[in-house]
Image (cartoon, helix red, strand yellow):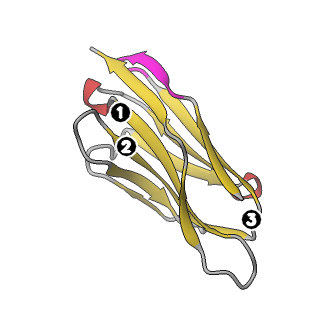
């Protein structure tokens, strides 16, 4: 069993900051890429940022320069530091991780349950 548990969401005013965390736990041999996606009401889930196990990062154009993704491999945890938040950043944010459960197992993607981020104008 593998679980991804997010935390750190909440209500913030425009221009403010939040830091999301997502910890992977359970039977884990290795964690490859980890990332964040978000889904606003009435919209499809969209990519926000990813980080490879070696630290290479990739961002959606809409968050570049404002959001920073990082990870702690020892803790199987990924973070999303969100600065200069805008009302259009309001969404449920989901953590995603490519996890190998056993040494000879194929990795697969797991999702967290989501955490609400609301940015007021």
**Residue 55 placed where, x, y %?**
56, 63
Q: Going 49% across and 39% down the picture, which residue do you hit? A: 114
Instruction: Point out which mark residue 28 bears.
Output: 3
**Residue 89 placed where, x, y %?**
32, 32
Quick check: 89 left or right of 94? left
Q: Going 44% across and 17% down the picture, which residue do you hit? A: 11
The residue at the far left in this view is 42
C-alpha distance separating marks 2 and 3 = 25 Å
Q: Name the residue under label 2.
A: 38
Residue range in magenta is 9-16
Given residues 17 and 113, the one toward you in this image is 113
Can residue 14 be seen here? The reply is: no
Name the secondary structure under disc 3: loop
Q: Say above or below: 26 vs 118.
A: below
Name the secondary structure under disc 1: strand
C-alpha distance separating marks 1 and 2 = 6 Å
Q: Say above or below: 95 vs 16.
A: below
Q: In which quarter of the image is residue 99?
A: bottom right
Q: Going 61% across and 80% down the picture, which residue do you hit? A: 106
Looking at the image, is mark 1 or mark 2 earlier in the sequence?
2
**Residue 32 placed where, x, y %?**
59, 69
Q: Name the residue under label 1.
A: 91
**Total residue callouts:** 3
Looking at the image, is mark 1 or mark 3 earlier in the sequence?
3
Q: Say above or below: 117 vs 60.
A: above
Q: Is residue 114 magenta?
A: no
Q: Is the C terminus in the top left, top right, bottom left or bottom right quadrant?
A: top left
């Amino acid at each position: 069993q593998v679980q991804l548990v997010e935390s750190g969401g909440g209500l913030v005013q425009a221009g403010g900051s939040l830091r999301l965390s997502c910890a992977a736990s359970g039977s884990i041999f290795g964690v490859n890429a980890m990332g964040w996606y978000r889904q606003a009401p009435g919209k499809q889930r969209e990519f926000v940022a990813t980080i490879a196990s070696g630290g290479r990062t990739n961002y959606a154009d809409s968050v570049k320069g404002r959001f920073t993704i990082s990870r702690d491999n020892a803790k199987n945890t990924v973070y999303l530091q969100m600065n200069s938040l805008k009302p259009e950043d309001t969404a449920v944010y989901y953590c995603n991780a490519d996890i190998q459960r056993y040494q000879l197992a194929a990795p697969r993607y797991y999702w967290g349950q989501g955490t609400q981020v609301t940015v007021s104008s």
